[in-house]
Amino acid sequence: MPRKLVVANWKMHGNLSANRQLLEAYIQKLKPLENVDIVVCVPYPYLAQAQSLLAGTSIAWGAQNLSKDLVGAYTGEVSVGMLQDFGATHVIVGHSERATAYCESDENIATKFMQAKSHGLTPILCVGETLIEREAGVMEMVVAKQIDTIINTYGASMFANAVVAYEPIWAIGSGLAATPEQAQNMHEFIRGRIAAHDESAANSLKILYGGSVNSQNAVQLFVMQDIDGGLIGRGSLTAEEFEGICRAAN
Ligand code: 13P
């Protein structure tokens, strides 16, 4: 069975002293877990802090967004090269909280994915449907469009060794996670969609589930065939809860 991957997405939480406490607790509690890969995606200003505390540990760090451009007059943006300067190995792209609040198109998200991938960072592409879309039965169509934009623009080989996170919007922060079967069905659909173009890329891709994962429901989700780990919001903000989730994956 391939190693699981658990990614913490702190979103806009934290400050220097709280982060230090949390990261030190992560280091101590997660150290014995040798069969799971762990990444923490921090707000931009704390990348240097993550680097200085996590370098030399088994926990990697990353960012929650990046610019689609490499350099230039783009006020407020952060480039892939800047993330690499601080040792980031992963970057979340297309999180629904950004896509809706900042009107990110599938095309922009695809470009960000390509920039990360082609510069050696592992992109974590977030996809997922709203509750209305699920109730209308069009969730696969919605997710297919997000995936296909990348396939059609840059080719399915972009997904080799990358990460997709299936995050149904209705499950994020709601306390109502998808059932293991709902998640498994969508993960299988995503892998199949990519495999139709590039089977080896699809097999090397990790597909994470995100949305109200906690230490109680993590095992049932992670045992599913196509669920390769989790993208964790609230559950990553306390070391005890995050440890429980990482243990489930381990
Ligand atoms: P929660 O775990 O808080 O539901 O958030 C999920 C998420 O959006 C991770 O990116």
Image (spheres, rainbow, N blue to C red):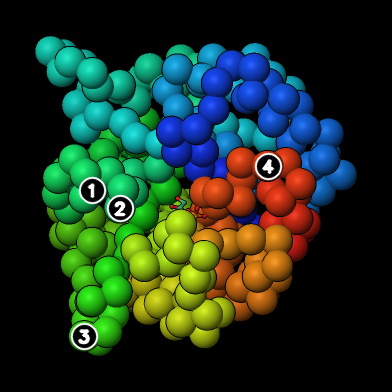
Dot 4 lies on which element? Answer: loop
Query: Is 78 on the left-hand or right-hand side of 209?
Result: left
- The residue to which callout 1 is attached is 99
Q: Is residue 178 visible?
A: yes
- 2 or 4: mark nearer the eye: 4
Q: Residue at x 42, y 48 (%)?
A: 124
Q: Contact, CB < 8 Å: mark 1 with mark 4?
A: no
- The residue to which callout 2 is attached is 96
Quarter containing the C terminus:
bottom right
Say what amino acid the circle numbered 4 marks: Thr
For ligand 1, tell me if the residue under mark 2 lies within 8 Å. yes
**Total numbered badges shown on the rendered structure:** 4
First reached walking from the N terminus: tag 2 or tag 4: 2
Question: Which of the labelled discs sits on residue 136, or is there none?
Answer: 3
Between the residue at mark 1 and the residue at mark 2, the CA separation in whole angstroms equals: 5 Å
Between the residue at mark 4 and the residue at mark 3, the CA separation in whole angstroms equals: 36 Å
Query: Looking at the picture, does residue 44 appear above or below residue 206?
Result: above
Query: Looking at the picture, does residue 106 appear above or below residue 71?
Result: below
Q: Residue at x 69, y 48 (%)?
A: 242
